[in-house]
Image (cartoon, rainbow, N blue to C red):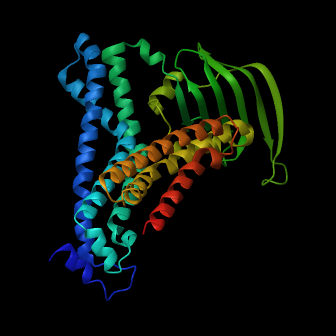
Amino acid sequence: MTITDIAIAGQGQQRRRAPRRLWGHILREFLLPLFSCLAAFSTLFLLFSILDDFEDMSKTQVPVRIMVTYFLARIPQDLANVIPVSVLMATSYMTVTLGKNNELTAMRASGLSLPVCAMPVWLVSILLCLVSLGIAEKWAPKCRDVCEEIQRVWVDGKKSRHKLEVPVVYASPATARDWFFRSFRRQDTMRNIVVRQYDSTGRTCWVLDCQEADWQNGVWTFRQGNIATYDYGQDAAHPVISREDFAERHENWLETPEDIYEDTQVSGTLNVSSLLRTLRATGDASPKKANYLKVMIWNRLTFPLACLVGACFGFALSLVSGRSGVMQGFASAIGLLVLFYILGQLTAVLGKNGTLGPFLGGGASNILFTLGGFWLVWKRR
């Protein structure tokens, strides 16, 4: 049975339904180029990594087993960008192929809605959005830690470990304190620190917020900050908060930078769960830091929508006739996906600086592009 016969079989159905056999055919036409693009782009990024780092590793005589581990651990860090582009290219290729074989014409002539016929594409794209989010939250941070550790031990030496400057969140059960470092360095000055102390019931006792701190000989030195003390009195739900500014404050606490590093393993980026915990620790002590964290949370949650954006633009802009029209539509789809990345990064920077609110800075542009993709698909139905 040809695709035309399958489409004609749907004439007696409602307009927005499609035969399951037709969905199976479209799914096959979509998955083959998708897997091919994923394999090709992953291999390309892997080759770039090898060309970039192989020389340094060969000079320091890194064992082959360690090198293989390092380069394989680089792949998940690139998948966030590989998957959306692969979805876009696979969707465009599928649409062009169906149009070239007059299968799209047969679907329309049978009264079938093209977006409904492409339902498998949307379902796979949504699944890939969830996969991208899972990779970014679980897999990529662990692989990033593996790469940093190999770089530290085998390439740069121990000094590189001391130069790491990344955001870190740390919870100390022994002292009932939460720590957040916007810039963490194990043996150097750390910047933008928030420390929250809890009592035995889990309520906040005080919050220390300072611009910089360092640790020497078991003593923490905090500079240019304030400490907010919580007095619950008779109304536990509305404590009285008093603030005290300080130029320099010394504390002989149990936590050390080494303990914090070993516990957190210094991920290059914090996942959403860590950001939420950090936001709770920061609270109302620093609205600027809270805004920064909310922007990051919105951005992490909405960036995986790039997979769905790529599918929508790849499908809608490839529904054209003629070779020149196909190439123009494909170029437009690629350009819009690049614009998705650029505007997302731009608004995120503006949000982190406080120019835009958390939602506008972290997630608005990503969601608007997704809605724009839906609208474009609906217009080309």
Q: Is residue 366 left or right of residue 307?
A: right
Could you tell me residue 314's position as x and y percent?
A: 38, 54
Q: Is residue 30 above or below residue 84?
A: below
Q: Is residue 284 above or below residue 190?
A: below
Q: Residue at x 45, y 54 (%)?
A: 309
- The answer to which of 314 and 191 lies nearer the viewer is 314
Q: Residue at x 24, y 41 (%)?
A: 40
Q: Residue furthest bottom?
A: 12
Q: Is residue 119 left or right of residue 191?
A: left
At 30% across and 74% down in the image, what residue appears? 107
- Residue shown at 71% from the left, 30% from the top: 209
User: Is 77 in front, or is 41?
Assistant: 41
Residue 208 figure quarter: top right
Where, quadrant-wise, is the C terminus in this rendering?
Answer: bottom left
- For the N terminus, which image quadrant? bottom left
**Farthest residue toward the left?**
1
Residue 124 shows in the view: yes
Q: In the visual, does 7 lie left or right of 301?
A: left
Which percent across, then down, holds residue 364? 60, 51
Residue 355: x %, y % from top left: 70, 38
* Total tally of numbered discs in the picture: 0
In this orientation, does residue 198 appear?
no
241 or 337: nearer the eye?
337
Residue 230 coordinates in the image, percent (x, y): 79, 41
Vertical placement of residue 16 versus 97, above or below: below
